[in-house]
Image (cartoon, grey):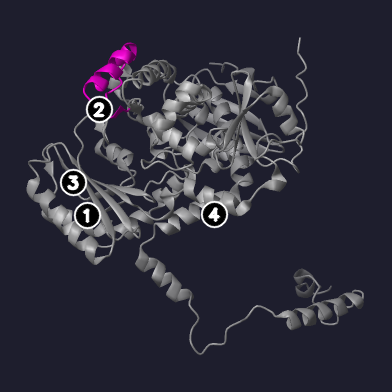
Amino acid sequence: MAKRPAAAFMTSVMDASGSFLLSCPQRVRRKTRAVAISIDLSLYPLEAVRAAAYAFTDRSYARLSRSGRRARVALAPKTAQDRLLADDFCNELLHQAVRLQVSRANRTLRELIVTKALVCAQPASRIAQERARRAPTPGRRQTRPPGRKLKKKISRFLAGIEAKGGSDPLGLFVPWEETQVKPG
Amino acid sequence: MRQALPRPPRLEAANVAAFRFRRLDGRYLVTDELGRCRFLTPQAFRRLVAGAPPAGLARRRLRLERLASSWRRRQRLPWSGPGRHVVIVADGAARMTIETARSVVDTILESPNPELAVELRGAALKASRPVVSFLTAYARRKSRLADKRLRLFLDAPPGSAGGAAAPAVTRRALSRARETVERCFRRGSAGIRLKPLDPPGRARPSRRRIGYTPQEFLRFYAEALGRVLELNERRRFYEETARGFLAKILLGRAPERCGLNSPCGAATARLAYDCDGGVYPCEEGLRLGRAGDETFRLARAGGGAYESAVGHAAVRAMAVASCLDNQPCCSQCAYQPYCGVCPIQCYAEQGDIMGRMPTNSRCLINQGILDLLMRKLRERASRRILRSWLS
């Protein structure tokens, strides 16, 4: 029996201002209702695509592939009633992309707040242990931050190196690969 | 035909401090990082964006030391370790044993917080009198030795929350907002707590029968709050949810109860203990555990339980998920300084501790309540009453 051709259609998601966000040709296999979504990687980072596909593993079997600047996600639903798989996936993809963006933008602030909250909850004994571990060992010479004299010395030294105009007698600036690869 | 959108004005970031905004009733509600808010006319808002901010939002005039201390005050709860501990002493046939009670107290007193509040709860506390007596005596003695201030609370009567009546808001109650408020008022309660139904389990059948949409709840809430304000002409009578938000808006202070902090404070500001000794990050986690989902069971009370509970991977994940600066929508929301997310509610409703705010019922309800409160705060008579609730 000849296989029925897969139906293809386009789905567009627009935001409130009418900006174009996503255009993904989807191929629907009529028998299994599997959905294949092609995603432009210039609009969505691959991490977001992976995270969105992962979030759908409770509802479907997900397969990811990539060709050039596009990623392809194939979702085979676990139940036949799941008709909104592709549309829900598009929303989830958008969520993951925005989350990634927000997470990167506020990384320093988030880390500071969360670390502070978690450290404050640690038992006093644990904090004391940590302090003892970091405390200076008696008899061991401690490194001090450089004083004004030392700073001047370092800057004179660096200025001297720069003044020599690129001479590198010790070969410090030669890349590692070049020193390791034998000629000929 | 596609219409061209008006070009947004260019923000002069050099002159203006960080702010968030929301359009409300034809004006712009502008809030800053500390939660100070003001309503601006569209013209004043354009001037703000163009680099002529009103006092308080001028970048060069910010007093950073004062701002930092104010910010710390707002985030007071999560910074000193778990201070609030809820212990379920008995539930139905299940009763806490003396050994478990001892382990629970030992675990509580491992918290670095110098002020501990222990709340004993249970369906039949009278039947568990020996355990309650032991737990109380042992906790008092041990806290004295550990040099900690201890406050013990016995279970409040069912349907109440700290002096405020807490009637169950079911679908049937939605059409009786005024009657519900008046009934609690007549009983002599100090206030009322109008809270939507508990975190909806995704497959809970009773939810369909007694549940409702956030919009339906908000209509009920608006009517009920209106009646609460009317009744304040006779005597002081507050609404607890509104009071929590008002504390943050007007006083800049995090309320005692959790849920309006960032991070949320689960296991970093409070812990909950089941009668079998199970340690949970909060009451919501415990409730979920009782329903059969033990995702948030952190440890079993006993030796080293506290350390393994607060160091649990779920606690870290919840702290990250409930940090509003890490949450799409929340990080840009004008109500961010007053709000908080509950990762367990998100998990129960949407299957992920990192909630999807555009469709999250708690987010929609909080936004609706805050819109309502902001409107009420603009009216002189309502503002006077709302302020009196905080005194």
Q: Are marks 4 and 3 on the same chain?
A: no
The magenta span reads: B165-193
Identify which amino acid the numbered label 3 is placed on.
Answer: Cys
Of helix, strand and loop, which one carries label 2? Answer: loop
Q: Between tags 4 and 2, which lies in front?
A: 2
The answer to which of marks 1 and 2 sits earlier in the sequence is 1
Q: Is residue B192 magenta?
A: yes
Which residue is rendered at x = 34% and y = 47% of the image? B281
Q: Between tags 3 and 2, which lies in front?
A: 2
Of helix, strand and loop, which one carries label 1? Answer: helix
Q: Chain of mark 1?
A: B
- Does residue B351 show up? no
Question: Which labelled disc corresponds to residue A112?
Answer: 4
Q: Which residue is mark 3?
A: B275
Q: Chain of mark 4?
A: A
Give the CA distance from mark 4 to mark 3. 35 Å
Q: Between tags 1 and 2, which lies in front?
A: 2
Give the CA distance from mark 1 to mark 4. 31 Å
Question: Which labelled disc corresponds to residue A89?
Answer: none
Q: Count numbered badges in the picture.
A: 4
Q: Which residue is mark 2?
A: B189
- Classify mark 3: residues with Cα within 10 Å, few (<14), some (14-19) or many (20+): many
Identify which amino acid the numbered label 4 is placed on.
Answer: Leu
**Residue at the top extreme?**
B1
Of helix, strand and loop, which one carries label 3? Answer: loop
| Residue B142 sits above or below residue B209 on the image | below
Q: Are marks 1 and 2 on the same chain?
A: yes
- Does residue B294 show up? yes
Mark 1 touches mark 4? (CB < 8 Å): no
Give the CA distance from mark 4 to mark 2. 42 Å
**Residue at the bottom extreme?**
A139
Mark 4 touches mark 2? (CB < 8 Å): no
